Amino acid sequence: MSLTKDEIIALLKDETHQQDLFDKADKVRRQYVGDEVHLRGLIEFSNICRNNCLYCGIRRGNAKAVRYRMSEDEVIETARRAVNLGFKTIVMQSGEDMYYDTSRMCRIIEAIKKFDVAITLSIGGRTYEEYKAFRAAGADRYLMRIETTDKALYHKLDPKMSWQHRYECLLTIKELGYELGSGIMVGLPEQSIESIAEDLLFLKEIGVDMAGIGPFIPHPQTPLAKEKGGTLNLSLRTMAIMRLLLPDINIPATTAMESLAPNGRIQALKAGANVVMPNVNEGEYRKLYELYPNKDCTQTAPAHTKSAVVQKILSINRTIGTGYGSHRK
Ligand code: SAH
């Protein structure tokens, strides 16, 4: 569906009639991608990061963060267990940790690929050669949010990072034949409604296969600790409009939404979302990837987390995806 920037702005601003928007997005979701909810097993394998984004709990400058990085064997073993729990996609996410160089990443990808799963990488900015090597090793998808298309705001949030570079990475990833996931945070300091509308049009323009949209949640050990953060409602409206603009893509009910309200994910699944990405880290590693506080399910084991999610999905008369859950165009 095509919407003008002004129409998007009007929908974003209209809290009173948001239920109509959610219902419409839900209908479009059912029509284009059906009732299946695809589950992705999320392995957060390192919280070491070379970047210093002001909003992020694992920013380099957060000296209080307890750092970890999983060994190759630990990542592979975590994936093996997730596959045994029934996950058909493994998402590997980390800070920008260069310990995982090309050969190390490729060995991990090749080993996990043997489990007959789709692999999504979410490890930030890399070179063309690296993206190419990961793809050749078997990575199917890449997830990297643009965070915001307001370039001035982006550079304020990390003066050392380049918006243009991140954008070019997205283009490279697409060109190499990955399914491309991107997305934004909602409620960043000084982010306007107009800018969120532009973000949505940007995601449509680059033709993402997946769009992850979540509220910004201030982390107490970051320079943005005192900011207000995004609301669940505005995040849901943004996500629902994304569904209208790109009816057949994959849209996750994000962990940050669940962190703001105990039924945040379910609300998202009823407003356009069709994917959930439960954390499958084991033990201590579950709570150390602290991008923001109150992250969902840091205290429960992967099997328990997964069955709780499955039950909730079934309770709203949706089904669990049985395939890889790729973008069906
Ligand atoms: N290093 C990878 C992964 C980053 S963490 C990369 O660069 O893509 C994954 C996502 O968490 C980020 O893209 C960001 O959108 C989100 N995130 C980080 N800090 C957050 C916060 N305080 N509140 C909400 N989401 C946050």
Image: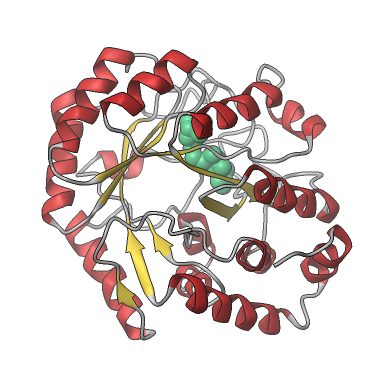
Compared to residue 268, the image places residue 62 above or below, namely above
Compared to residue 305, the image places residue 156 above or below, namely above
Q: Viewer-proximal residue, 100 or 120?
A: 120
Residue 71 appears in the picture as rendered: no
Q: Residue visible at 46% across and 68% down?
A: 265
Q: Position of residue 6 (x, y in %)?
A: 88, 62
Q: Viewer-proximal residue, 54 or 164?
A: 164
Describe residue 54's horizontal placement relative to residue 108 as left or right: right
Residue 74 appears in the picture as rendered: yes
Q: Residue visible at 20% across and 63% down?
A: 304
Q: Position of residue 136 (x, y in %)?
A: 31, 25
Describe residue 322's horizontal placement relative to residue 177 as left or right: left
Q: Quadrant of residue 162?
A: top right
Compared to residue 6, the image places residue 44 above or below, namely above
Q: Position of residue 128 (x, y in %)?
A: 48, 17
Residue at the extreme right: 6
Q: Residue visible at 33% across and 56% down?
A: 278
Describe residue 206's horizontal placement relative to residue 306 as left or right: right
Q: Position of residue 180 (x, y in %)?
A: 50, 41
Residue at the extreme front: 329
